Image: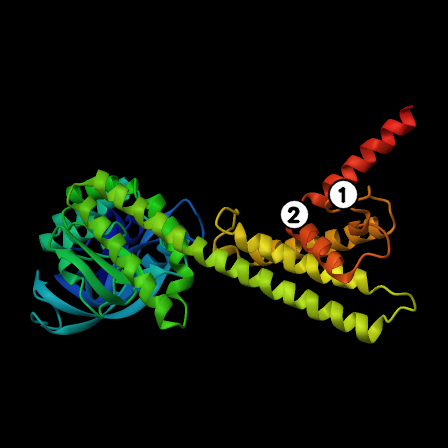
């Protein structure tokens, strides 16, 4: 004879002993011999690997938890036949466990007493890696009714209903350094009001343990549903700070997590409107801070690119492309264009549309492109004026202050380059007007 530990819906007579196996015992299903508990385990539900539409009850390691069941004295051959039948329908296999006797039913052959342990066989899903899922309402109701019919403690039955996946986590079990229902270490408790709710931090994220009472839990989840979208967005915005090695960024994330926890506490206390407003304010503050850092990174990228252009153009001119003809004016204009473009960015940085620092690559590319446009525009404008392709420009109407031709002084060239870099649309507009004028002449 051997002991069979039945839990979940295995405790029902029709599931405990199918008719074909009952024939092996004379056509009668055996009565449970005792109630027993399996320590450091939680009741969960997993999707079958044979039929993905089928969900079966399973055991998951959980320190400090327990699963209640019944102990049945059966021949080893019957247990093997039962396992084979379950393997075909629910993909379940035998597993040896050590249970503790809680309440005896009839005298056991081994004369076990309350508190003693015994080795028993139970059925578990073949694969521990199968997906953990939420049971449908019908399956959960059947498991709860089965637990009630067996006379299990009401706290355990309520825990099954409140846990959703049968883990049985209660509000009172939320403690520092303990593990929550997702097996994450609890790092901080913001608010705790047993048995109604607890708001805590696990894996550097704000989590909620709902009420032990299943009806209150449903109401809390319904109220919290309107906040879940904002919570996800806030988690995404501060995720980089939470995982950063820099203490300053981690502190910043913890500050916002505390504000999120305060908002969730408002919702759990029944003030959903102010909770939503509070989360919106948290998100707005994070976006503003991210945008501020984005503007700083944009400005630094532009400055670095402008310096790189100036130094690079100087090295190229002096070491690699020393032309026979005098091209110094063009190089001066190009460098002045880089400085003018940076000056334009620095003045308009507050009004400029800049992405948050989460999109730093885009900000860097945009800043570098703006400086490059300034360099190209300054060079093109200098060429247009030196070759007299652009209309003659003079200062004060005096011919000795003409800004066209090859005799323009270096300071005028630098000024032209700076203006071209500063005014982003100057050269494109000039080229557009020139194209329009050429089209008009051809039409005549």
**Which quadrant of the figure has residue 188?**
bottom left
**Which quadrant of the figure has residue 318?**
bottom right
In-image side of 302 versus 384 (left or right): left
- Secondary structure under the numbered disc 2 in the rendered image: loop
Locate residue 290, reporting x and y percent: 43, 55
**Few, some or many residues within 10 Å of mark 2 (<14, 14–19, 20+):** some
Q: CA distance from mark 2 to mark 1?
A: 23 Å
The numbered dot on residue 412 is none
User: 232 or 327: which is nearer to us?
Assistant: 327
In-image side of 48 versus 73 (left or right): right
Locate residue 247, reporting x and y percent: 35, 72
- Secondary structure under the numbered disc 1 in the rendered image: loop
User: 369 or 329: which is nearer to us?
Assistant: 329
Q: What residue do we see at 29% from left, 41% from top? A: 225
Which dot, 2 or 1, sits closer to the camera?
1
Q: What residue do we see at 53% from left, 47% from top? A: 352
Instruction: Establish if 67 lies above or below 274.
Output: below
Q: Which residue is mark 1?
A: 397
Q: Quadrant of the C terminus?
A: top right
Q: Residue furthest top?
A: 444
Locate residue 183, reporting x and y percent: 29, 64
Locate residue 70, reporting x and y percent: 17, 59
Q: Could you tell me how many numbered marks the image carries?
A: 2
Q: Which residue is mark 2?
A: 423
Q: Quadrant of the N terminus?
A: bottom left
**Few, some or many residues within 10 Å of mark 1 (<14, 14–19, 20+):** few
Q: Are marks 2 and 1 in contact (CB under 8 Å)?
A: no
Q: Earlier in the sequence, mark 2 or mark 1?
A: 1
User: 69 or 217: which is nearer to us?
Assistant: 217
Q: What residue do we see at 79% from left, 71% from top? A: 316
């Amino acid at each position: 004879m051997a002991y069979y530990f039945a839990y979940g819906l295995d405790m029902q007579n029709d599931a405990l002993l199918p008719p074909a196996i009952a024939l092996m015992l004379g056509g009668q299903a055996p009565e449970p011999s005792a109630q027993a508990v399996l320590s450091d385990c939680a009741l969960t539900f997993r999707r079958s690997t044979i039929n993905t539409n089928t969900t079966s009850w399973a055991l998951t390691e959980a320190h400090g938890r327990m699963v209640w069941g019944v102990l049945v004295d059966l021949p080893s051959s019957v247990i093997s036949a039962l396992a084979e039948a379950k393997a075909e329908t629910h993909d379940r296999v035998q597993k040896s466990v050590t249970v503790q006797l809680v309440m005896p039913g009839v005298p056991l052959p081994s004369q076990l007493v309350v508190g003693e342990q015994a080795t028993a066989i139970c059925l578990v899903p073949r694969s521990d890696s199968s997906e953990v899922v939420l049971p449908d309402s019908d399956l959960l109701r059947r498991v709860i009714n089965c637990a009630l019919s067996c006379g299990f403690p009401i706290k355990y039955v309520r825990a099954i209903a409140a846990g959703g996946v049968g883990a049985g986590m209660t509000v009172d079990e939320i403690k520092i350094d303990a593990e929550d229902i997702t097996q994450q270490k609890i790092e901080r408790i913001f608010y705790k009001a047993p048995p109604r709710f607890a708001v805590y931090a696990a894996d550097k994220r704000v989590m909620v343990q709902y009420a032990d009472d299943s009806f209150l839990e449903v109401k809390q989840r319904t109220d919290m549903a309107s906040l879940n979208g904002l919570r996800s967005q806030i988690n995404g915005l501060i995720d980089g700070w939470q995982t950063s090695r820099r203490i300053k960024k981690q502190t910043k994330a913890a500050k916002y997590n505390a504000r999120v926890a305060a908002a969730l506490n408002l919702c759990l206390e029944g003030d959903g409107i102010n909770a939503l407003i509070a989360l919106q304010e948290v998100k707005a503050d994070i976006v503003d801070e991210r945008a501020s850092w984005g503007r700083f990174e944009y400005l630094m990228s532009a400055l670095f690119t402008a310096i790189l252009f100036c130094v690079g153009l100087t090295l190229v001119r002096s070491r690699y492309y020393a032309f026979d003809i005098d091209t110094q004016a063009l190089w001066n204009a190009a460098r002045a264009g880089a400085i003018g473009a940076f000056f334009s960015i620095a003045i308009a940085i507050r009004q400029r549309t800049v992405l948050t620092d989460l999109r730093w690559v885009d900000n860097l590319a945009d800043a570098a492109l703006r400086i490059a446009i300034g360099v190209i525009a300054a060079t093109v404008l200098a060429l247009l004026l030196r070759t007299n392709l652009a209309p003659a420009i003079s200062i004060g109407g005096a011919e000795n202050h003409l800004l066209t031709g090859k005799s323009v002084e270096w300071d005028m060239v630098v000024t032209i380059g700076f203006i071209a870099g500063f005014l982003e649309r100057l050269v494109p507009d000039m080229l557009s007007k020139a194209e329009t004028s050429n089209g008009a002449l051809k039409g005549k």
